[in-house]
Image: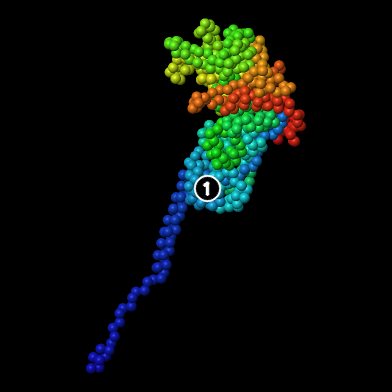
Amino acid sequence: MGLLTNHRRRRWRAEPAEQPDPRAQTTARLNILKLVVAAAFVALAVQLANLQLVRGHEFQQRAQLNQLRIEPIIPARGLIYDRNGVQLVNNVPSFSAVVIAADIPKARTLQIADGLQQLLGVPPLETTLKIEQARRSNDPFAPVIIKDGLDQTTAFRLREELSRLPGVQIAVEPVRHYMHGNVMSDVIGFTGRIDPQEYAALKGKGYIPSDRLGKAGVEATYEQYLRGVPGRKEIEKDATGREIRTLAQDPAKPGDTVVLSIDYDLQKKTTELLQKAANGGQAAAVVMDVHTGEVLALVSLPTYDGNTFSGKVDAAKYQQYLNDPNKPLVNHAISEEYAPGSIFKQITGTAALQEGVATPSTTIAANGYILVPNEYNPSILYRFNDWRSFGNLDFYGGVAWSSDVYFYYLAGGYHWYGQNFNGLGVDRLARYARDYGLGSKTGIDLTGEAAGNIPDPAWKQKTFGDVWTLGDTYNMAIGQGFVTATPIQMVRVTVAVANGGTLFVPRVVREVRDAQGHVIVPNVPKVARQLPISAANFAIMRQAMMDSVSWGAATAAHVNDLAIAGKTGTAEFGNPGANGVSDTHAWFTGFAPANNPQLAVTVFLEKGIGGVNAAPVGAQILDYYFHRPQQAAAPGAAPPQGIAQP
């Protein structure tokens, strides 16, 4: 029992579990860590080899570019003065926000675009597209304008945030300020940002995508002188594009000084006189020296303010200009073609004298109209009217009274009802008109000039598929029909009559001077040609134009103590109204003093009558020039022959 009992009380125990060896665990973990570290070192070694051996040259160049940059120094644009030393433009600082695409981390592009939206109000998509386009360009280090024309408050706020906007910079550049508003805009023009097409053509000449250049007027035609020569500086920058220091610098050369032939005082007065007569419509006036071809005043109405396009473009004002039916952005003095009307008779008259078609004593019965039978059916009569009945007129009377019938005879002749008068014919008349420079550009040193039109039978056949008629020749004789011309062309015609046949190339720039005051483009008149008309015949025309002001159709151009020779013109345009009458343009052209011509003027008004509306304006312009009180030079301005240098 005892044995049994003792046996039952015996308890069986499980074998104790085998405990892991702590030292073995530690060793295993160390081995895994060694493998991870070894793999990491292998990966780093591979990457290092890739960076140093495979792409080492690429990253070396990028590192150098991040450190050293060559940046252009924008030169100060040259100033512009009138002939008497009156300063017309200056340069003022303007702030712009720009980005350097190469300095913007790709991962932060959207973040930076959002930041610029908060500061400048520029949509992020617009900024992002500009950055990406610059990245893909040939020069990702060229500054790209995000927003220009910043006010100082915005510019300073942006400057405070540049540390968190890598690749963003504030550019300070000079922009034009036109000191006399719209009085000089059609001559001076304006500057603006270079567009992609201009940049593609000019990048080889040192222009950059953010440059400004002349877009119209003298600013455009004399861009090569006004721009100056950009400088360059070598600077050290950090990886975000921040400038650290300047290592070397080649200064920019400022632009040259342009001296206009324009007399600002006369330009201003001409503008005032023309505005009173134009009544808000299109108008133009040009005043020219008869011995040099220099333009002393050139006004086009309505005009515009060049400051609209300088710096940040005034979009609302620009749209207003575009919507104006009178086209203020068009220079009506050189770019618009109009029927010249009776001021064209200067050409018809001198051509008839030179060709022996007329003499001073040639007398024609100008009884208000002529009747011309149809050459195929004589029972059909065409009536060509005059503006009134004059009776018998000699050459002086024909010009002085501006008789249309008289000039119908001179140009087309008359061979009916017992009369046999041989005229010039269309070919000779067209040849003389082209000799006077009509039908082609004058070559004036302004942009956007139109050529006008001198028709002939070949032109009509090509243009309309129709034959030339005698009526076409009659209309051409009086500056109507298919004839068109610009005011600058017609004042040049009058200048040639006044000086005895010298046809000048007009110019609005007198000379160009460099920064040291040396004349690099001298004041030298340029002659287009000498007209094939005798001095005696020009003298006859000048006397006839004097008679027109003394007792003929241009008496409204009379001025006490100043002898003026002139010619009026009233040209029909557009379709006749319900009363059968068309609207008319008003012209006047003339010169003074009549016996010793010095100055010529041509006035154009879109609507009006030459002898009523345009002639008084022309007379007032000449009167002001010759009788204005002698005024001291403007404060700070140099005398006419000594233009002050900026």
Instruction: Please give the residue where the numbered disc 1 appears in the rendered image.
Output: 122
Task: Out of 422 and 173, give the one closest to the viewer.
Answer: 422
Task: Report x, y in % for residue 16.
Answer: 33, 78
Q: Quadrant of residue 389?
A: top right
Q: Kindly tell me whether residue 417 is visible in this rendering.
A: yes
**Colour pattern of the rendering:** rainbow
Residue drawn where x is 64% and y is 32% of the image: 276
Residue 171 as seen in the image, left or right of residue 379: right
Q: Position of residue 205 (x, y in %)?
A: 57, 32
Q: Name the quarter where the N terminus is drawn.
A: bottom left
In the displayed structure, 483 sits above or below 211; it is above
Please tell me in which quadrant of the rendered image residue 595 appears.
Answer: top right
Identified at 56% across, 31% down, the residue is: 330
Q: Amino acid at mark 1?
A: Val
Task: Identify which residue, 97 or 590, lies in the foreground.
Answer: 590
User: Eyeballing the image, is 364 above or below 337?
Assistant: above
Residue 223 location in percent, x, y?
61, 31
Q: Quadrant of the C terminus?
A: top right
In this rendering, the answer to whether 452 lies above or below 176 is: above
Mark 1: few/some/many CA within 10 Å (<14, 14-19, 20+): some
In this picture, residue 17 sits left or right of residue 159: left
Comparing 313 with 277, the one in front is: 277
Residue 533 visible (yes or no): no
- Which residue corresponds to the image point at 52% horizontal and 44% vertical from the top-left? 101
Q: Nearer the viewer, residue 615 or 335?
A: 615
Q: Secondary structure at mark 1?
A: loop
Rendered residue at 69%/18% (across/down): 594
Where does residue 348 sit, x and y in percent of width and height? 58, 14
In this rendering, the count of numbered labels is 1
